[in-house]
Amino acid sequence: MEQPADLLALAVSVARAAGDLANRMRADGVDAVATKSTATDVVTAADRAVERLVRDKLKEARPGDVVFGEEFGGGQERAAVRWILDPIDGTVNYLYNIPVYAVSLAAEVDGQVVAGVVLNAATGREWTATRGGGAFCGGRRLRVTGETDLGQALVGTGFGYAAERRLHQARVLLGLIGHVRDVRRIGAASIDLCLVAEGALDAYYEKGLNPWDHAAGGLVAAEAGALVTGLDGNPPGADMVIAAPPALHPHLHDLLSKLDASGGP
Ligand code: LIP
């Protein structure tokens, strides 16, 4: 039986090596080397190099496992553990040298994420969690806020790489912004989810995320007491990821559902 604490220890050591590489390449200067879904969905040489390094280190430590990563995909074969990897979450922040980008690595066993680490490579801030074992940052156990009033809630969100999607997300934001304290657009879903976990945000929601954007951060938020869901009974996924304390979640959920937040392009 795979021990989540052992998988976490491996994830943390691999993420730290990955963060160091991301920082070295950042110091050498970063250029977009290609684009993916749209002209603004960039990939840098560091995204690819960091993913290769993580894959090599995981193969060395646990040859039988598989890796599902943002840049090279994979991870569809059966294995005791599937690692879900975003080598640099917040690639646009990385490109612009905004110190909010992360190595996000989660271990999945039998379809369930059991361990995860999110490491902000620029600041060294590291959030970790194991299923049933709680969420931590800097040795401190994390707890979501006790906010119950949506009108007092500081809410994080994000926008996609396709203009039509951003227009839909902006319409949703227009319908939401008068009902909350304020909004933050931080630019890295994995970090947004960890900020909910540590109470630096009251809640977060975003449409269009991939599993690598929310696998590790979602466990950190859940282990800190957040409800991490989709809309209308769906699990967190491409249509919607919402993370909020139990007392706040239904209010945010119902408003987003009314605003058709998981709809549009
Ligand atoms: C990013 C997400 C962010 C979202 C961006 C992008 P990437 O992931 O972390 O929340 O708003 O559009 O998807 O592309 O930097 O790995």
Image: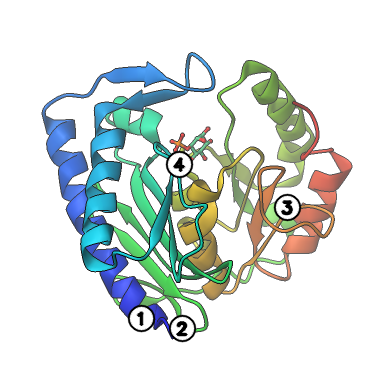
Rounded to the nearest whole Å, what is the CA distance between mark 3 and mark 2? 32 Å
Specify the amino acid type for callout 3. Gly
The residue sitting at 44% across, 86% down in the picture is 1
Specify the amino acid type for callout 1. Ala
Specify the amino acid type for callout 2. Gly
| Residue on which disc 2 sits | 133
Crowdedness of circle 3 by 10 Å Cα count: few (<14), some, many (20+)? Answer: some
Quarter occupied by residue 112: bottom right
Residue 198, can we see it?
Answer: no
Tell me, for residue 152, which label it has, or none. none
| Near-viewer residue (196 or 88) | 88
Rounded to the nearest whole Å, what is the CA distance between mark 4 and mark 3? 40 Å
Q: Quadrant of the C terminus?
A: top right
Rounded to the nearest whole Å, what is the CA distance between mark 1 and mark 3? 38 Å
Residue 72's spot in the image, x, y percent? 40, 38
Tell me the element at label 2.
Answer: loop
| Residue on which disc 1 sits | 5
Tell me the element at label 3.
Answer: helix
| Residue on which disc 3 sits | 151
Tell me, for residue 73, which label it has, or none. 4
Tell me the element at label 4.
Answer: loop
Marks 1 and 2 in Cβ contact (< 8 Å): yes
Q: Earlier in the sequence, mark 4 or mark 3?
A: 4
Q: Earlier in the sequence, mark 1 or mark 2?
A: 1
Rounded to the nearest whole Å, what is the CA distance between mark 1 and mark 2? 9 Å
